[in-house]
Amino acid sequence: MTDSVDVAALAEIAGSLAREVGEGVRAQRAVGVTVAQTKSSLTDVVTAADQEAERLLAAGLRRLRPHDGLLGEEGASTAGTTGVTWVVDPIDGTVNYLYDLPAYAVSVAATVEDGAPGTMSDGRRAVAGAVYVPSSGELFTAWDGGGAYLDGERLSGPTDTELGSTLLATGFGYTVERRTEQAEVLRHVLPRVRDIRRMGSAAVDLCMLAAGRLDAYYERGLQPWDYAAAALIAREAGVVVRGLGDNRAGEELLIAGARGVSAELATLIAEAYRRL
Ligand code: LIP
């Protein structure tokens, strides 16, 4: 628990803003979406809806939590004085959004930097968060020590499986170098699991894991806004979220699953990287 902050109240704020902005994102999708700019590569795109959604999230957080910090994927960055920094991804799964595919989400997390268990490799620990999936209208929420919920119903995560029976999600970066490496790792992993799903949104992947619709997930190269809220939701649903070895989960690698399968997966992925 985080004693000095009312984390349940922060989760309420995260949920209401994620849903409100997400409904606007969905409405814009119906009207039409175009690429506004590219980032790390020609395929790493930003739409005007991403930019507008982040502006609305920032305005809502300024109104509700005026002294907190803010870090957003599309450039929002303000220091706060409360020790709480909101980490937001206005549309996680932007390429899916651009193509009108359903796996995209609005992700809002309240984070602190206290080094407590659950701290990710960027030094932040989410203490409250929400992920809203506009295409399904599903709202995932969680707060530190309070559990994880889908539309108010408690989530209990996946049951543990053998690696060979594991439905495993993963994702890929936007540069040729990173994708070449990830393909080599996947070549090593794919024959050892039930099947792979590449849905295109880390936030959706981790929430599907929390809801027991996947058995495990791993990805390299994620940014704090991709995972901040959804990693908390997964953890509060009983999912182990880890890095390789004793490393914290985060950009280097994020592995998530029930206890047994996450340990087996970490061993398998470590082997794959050693062979590169
Ligand atoms: C996405 C991640 C996803 C990854 C995609 C992309 P974005 O974030 O959530 O896991 O595989 O390549 O990075 O760019 O849509 O916010």
Image (cartoon, rainbow, N blue to C red):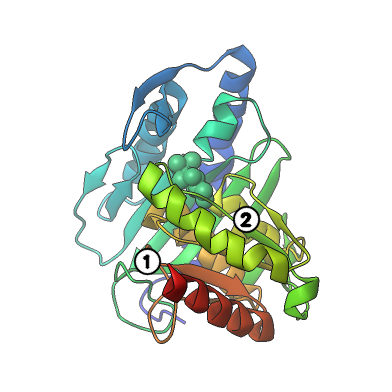
Q: Distance between the residues labelled 2 and 1?
A: 17 Å
Q: Report x, y in % for residue 132.
A: 60, 46
Which residue: 23% across, 46% down?
Answer: 77
Question: In the figure, is residue 108 to the left or right of 59?
Answer: right
Mark 1 residue element:
loop
- Would you place residue 190 above or below residue 242 in this image? above
> Crowding at label 2, few (<14), some or many (≥20) Cα neighbours within 10 Å?
many
- Would you place residue 98 above or below residue 21 in this image? above
Which residue: 28% across, 72% down?
Answer: 113
Q: Is residue 217 visible to us here?
A: no
Q: Give whichever of 68, 239 is nearer the camera.
A: 239
Residue 252's disc number: 1
**Given the current orientation, which residue lies at the most extreme top position?**
31
Q: Is residue 94 visible to us here?
A: yes
Q: Report x, y in % for residue 221.
A: 40, 56
Q: Report x, y in % for residue 148.
A: 64, 68
**Ligand 1 lies under 8 Å from the Cβ of mark 2:** yes
Which residue: 35% across, 36% down?
Answer: 59
Q: Name the residue under label 2.
A: 205
Question: In the figure, is residue 112 to the left or right of 94?
Answer: left
**Given the current orientation, which residue lies at the most extreme front position?**
275
Q: Report x, y in % for residue 195.
A: 75, 60
- Would you place residue 215 above or below residue 238 in this image? above
Which residue: 62% across, 27% down?
Answer: 26
Give the label, 2 or 1, closer to the camera: 1
Residue type at tag 2? Asp
Q: Give whichever of 90, 40 is nearer the camera.
A: 40
Residue type at tag 1? Glu
> Crowding at label 1, few (<14), some or many (≥20) Cα neighbours within 10 Å?
some
Q: Which image quadrant is residue 175 in? A: top left
Mark 2 residue element:
helix
Question: In the figure, is residue 10 to the left or right of 167?
Answer: left
